[in-house]
């Protein structure tokens, strides 16, 4: 069975991943870890009276963004290796909203199931279910496992 | 791991059941197939002049619910047998709450580790992508929820 695990840098995603491996994973399952990072907001350039292209700032934002992506990739590569899971890791930047990108990815890799946490990095903690999980739950064409942490 | 599989009369529930045992199940998992029985529709009666307590109607309504429950039980136990797996069948009776609420409290009292529910069941309104029970459980269950979608 091919399982797509949608992660982000949050604790919840890590716990969901660990829970999947501890309770659900079966020998022979192929795990596809993905993160669909949204294109970071780059400063808009304002050509009015001697404005200069904010190259330094843009450079900084992109470096930061790429650094986070690499960290995430390393974290999950190490996890998969230590659990000895047959895996593939795909951390990419997308123009789509994360929910849309995750559903597209699941179709593209022919995943049989999607695993994800209830919430991620969002600042608004009022809701029980984050926007990305909510979107995927409603639009996925395959079963979705929403992993709620024990302390939530 | 204790797994609760929510079933109703729909084919979606049957597929979820088969899918679970085919792709997910490991030896050592305790599986409970759970059916939330409907409250029988008891006819209301009015104490007018020579009103007679509709005893027979009551009995018929209750009997209908009971036979539905027996039917569900037989269906799922025979499926389990055919797949050569071990599975318990439980019927829950709601105490006025919605099926979702009844299931959520059952999950707590049983200390379930995972609940599997179909995306839609018997509901007449087919516009919504996610039925009321799966929606309720995803938002309120304290354990991981797997929402099954038929391919």
Image (cartoon, grey):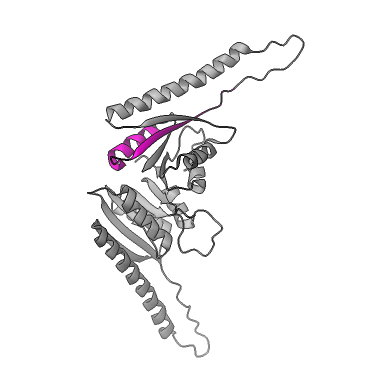
Which quadrant of the view contains residue B6? top left
Along the line of sight, the residue nearer the viewer: B22 or B11: B22
Q: Tag count in the figure?
A: 0
Assign the C terminus of chain B to one quadrant of the image: top left
Which quadrant of the view contains residue B121? top left
Q: Is residue B29 left or right of residue B66?
A: left
In the image, which residues are magenta?
Answer: B12-41
Residue B76 % position (x, y): 37, 28
Q: Is residue A128 above or below residue B133?
A: below
Along the line of sight, the residue nearer the viewer: A152 or B82: A152
Residue A134 % position (x, y): 47, 52
Q: Which residue shows up at 74% across the image and 15% down it? A: B47
Question: Outermost residue toward the right?
Answer: B49
Residue B30 part of the magenta-drawn span: yes
Along the line of sight, the residue nearer the viewer: A131 or B101: B101
Q: Which residue shows up at 49% across the image and 44% down it? A: B137
Q: Is residue B28 above or below residue B65?
A: below
Q: Which residue shows up at 40% across the image and 33% down it? A: B33
Assign the N terminus of chain B to one quadrant of the image: top left
Residue B149 part of the magenta-drawn span: no
Along the line of sight, the residue nearer the viewer: A52 or B15: B15
Residue B85 % position (x, y): 29, 32
Q: Which residue shows up at 49% across the image and 84% down it? A: A47
Residue B81 % position (x, y): 30, 27
Question: Outermost residue toward the bottom?
Answer: A50
Q: Is residue B48 left or right of residue B76?
A: right
Q: Is residue A103 above or below residue B120?
A: below
């Amino acid at each position: 069975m091919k399982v797509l695990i949608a992660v982000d840098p949050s604790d919840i995603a890590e716990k969901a991943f660990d829970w999947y491996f501890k309770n659900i994973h079966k020998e022979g399952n192929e795990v596809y870890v993905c993160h669909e990072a949204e294109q970071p907001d780059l400063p808009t350039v304002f050509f009015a009276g001697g404005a200069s292209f904010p190259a330094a700032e843009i450079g900084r934002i992109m470096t930061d963004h790429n650094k986070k992506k690499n960290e995430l990739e390393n974290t999950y590569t190490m996890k998969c290796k230590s659990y000895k899971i047959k895996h593939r890791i795909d951390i990419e930047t997308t123009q789509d909203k994360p929910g849309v990108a995750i559903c597209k990815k699941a179709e593209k890799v022919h995943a049989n199931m999607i695993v994800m946490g209830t919430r991620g990095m969002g600042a608004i903690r009022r809701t029980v279910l984050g926007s990305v999980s909510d979107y995927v739950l409603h639009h996925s064409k395959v079963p979705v496992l929403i992993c709620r942490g024990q302390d939530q | 791991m204790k797994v609760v599989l929510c079933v109703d009369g729909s084919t979606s529930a049957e597929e979820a059941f088969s899918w679970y045992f085919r792709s997910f199940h490991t030896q050592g998992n305790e599986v409970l197939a759970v059916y939330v029985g409907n409250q029988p529709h008891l006819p209301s009666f009015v104490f007018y002049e020579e009103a007679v307590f509709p005893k027979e109607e009551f009995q018929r309504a209750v009997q209908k619910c009971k036979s539905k429950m027996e039917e569900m039980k037989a269906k799922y136990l025979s499926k389990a047998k055919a797949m050569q797996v071990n599975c318990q069948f439980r019927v829950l009776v709601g105490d006025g709450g919605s099926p979702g609420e009844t299931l959520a409290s059952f999950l707590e009292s049983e200390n379930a580790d995972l609940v599997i529910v179909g995306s839609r069941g018997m509901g007449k309104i087919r516009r919504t992508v996610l039925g009321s029970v799966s929606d309720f459980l995803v938002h309120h269950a304290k354990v991981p929820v797997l929402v099954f979608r038929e391919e």
